Image (cartoon, helix red, strand yellow):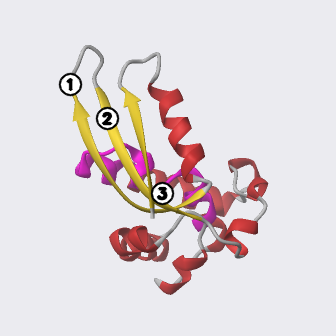
């Protein structure tokens, strides 16, 4: 397992750019776990340590990444995405972490496209590793069943 450290500066100038850097990184690796610490300084920032593994070749990694964007979604899939983005926001607030630490947009798009019905089906979803499956698997399946 490898680690990488990121900082998300909380000033308006850097906040979104710093998040995009992390999101881009997370799209290329298999996320295992993370730890965060709020650092209060002249510019407050989140320090994030991400534990990850390089992805092997399987159907998730070979999936055309262009398929995982908002423009390729059907109306039903867009409804699923909207519900998951709200759930992600609520979950991130309750845990006190940034939303991308819950699920990235591409993971939400993958859920909407694949519509897993069991916890085991989450293994086929882009961006869901064992940690995310353990933390959020039941909630993901429950939310899909409620839509």
Crowdedness of circle 1 by 10 Å Cα count: few (<14), some, many (20+)? Answer: few
Of residues 36 and 56, the one drawn nearer to the viewer in this rendering: 56
Q: CA distance from mark 2 to mark 3?
A: 26 Å
Of residues 23 and 117, the one drawn nearer to the viewer in this rendering: 23
Is label 1 in a helix, a strand or a loop?
loop
Residue receiving disc 1: 40
**Is label 2 or label 3 in front?**
2
Q: Position of residue 30 (x, y in %)?
A: 53, 63
Snapshot quadrant of residue 72: bottom right
Res. 83 mark: 3
Q: Position of residue 65 (x, y in %)?
A: 74, 56
Is label 3 in a helix, a strand or a loop?
helix
Q: Mark 2 or mark 3, which has the lower sequence index?
A: 2
Verify whether residue 42 appears in magenta. Answer: no
Q: Residue at x 51, y 68 (%)?
A: 128
Q: Is residue 41 left or right of residue 87?
A: left
Note whether residue 118 is visible: no
**Tag 3–tag 1 contact (CB < 8 Å):** no
Q: Position of residue 31 (x, y in %)?
A: 48, 61
Of residues 43 and 2, the one drawn nearer to the viewer in this rendering: 2
Q: Residue at x 37, y 18 (%)?
A: 11
Crowdedness of circle 2 by 10 Å Cα count: few (<14), some, many (20+)? Answer: some
Q: Residue at x 78, y 53 (%)?
A: 66
Q: Mark 2 or mark 1, which has the lower sequence index?
A: 1
- Above/below status of 7 relative to 107: above
Which residues fall within the magenta stretch? 88-111
Q: Residue at x 25, y 51 (%)?
A: 95
Residue receiving disc 2: 46
């Amino acid at each position: 397992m490898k680690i990488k450290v990121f900082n998300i500066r909380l000033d308006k100038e850097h906040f979104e750019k710093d998040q995009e850097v992390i999101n881009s990184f997370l799209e290329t690796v298999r996320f295992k776990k993370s730890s965060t610490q709020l650092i209060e300084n002249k510019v407050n920032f989140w320090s994030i340590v991400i534990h990850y593994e390089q992805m092997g070749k399987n159907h998730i990694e070979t999936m055309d990444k262009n398929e995982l964007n908002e423009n390729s979604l059907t109306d039903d899939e867009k409804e699923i995405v909207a519900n998951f983005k709200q759930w992600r926001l609520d979950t991130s607030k309750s845990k006190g972490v940034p939303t991308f630490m819950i699920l990235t947009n591409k993971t939400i798009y993958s859920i909407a496209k694949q519509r897993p019905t069991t916890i085991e089906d989450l293994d086929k979803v882009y961006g869901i590793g064992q940690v995310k499956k353990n933390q959020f698997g039941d909630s993901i399946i429950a939310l899909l069943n409620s839509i």
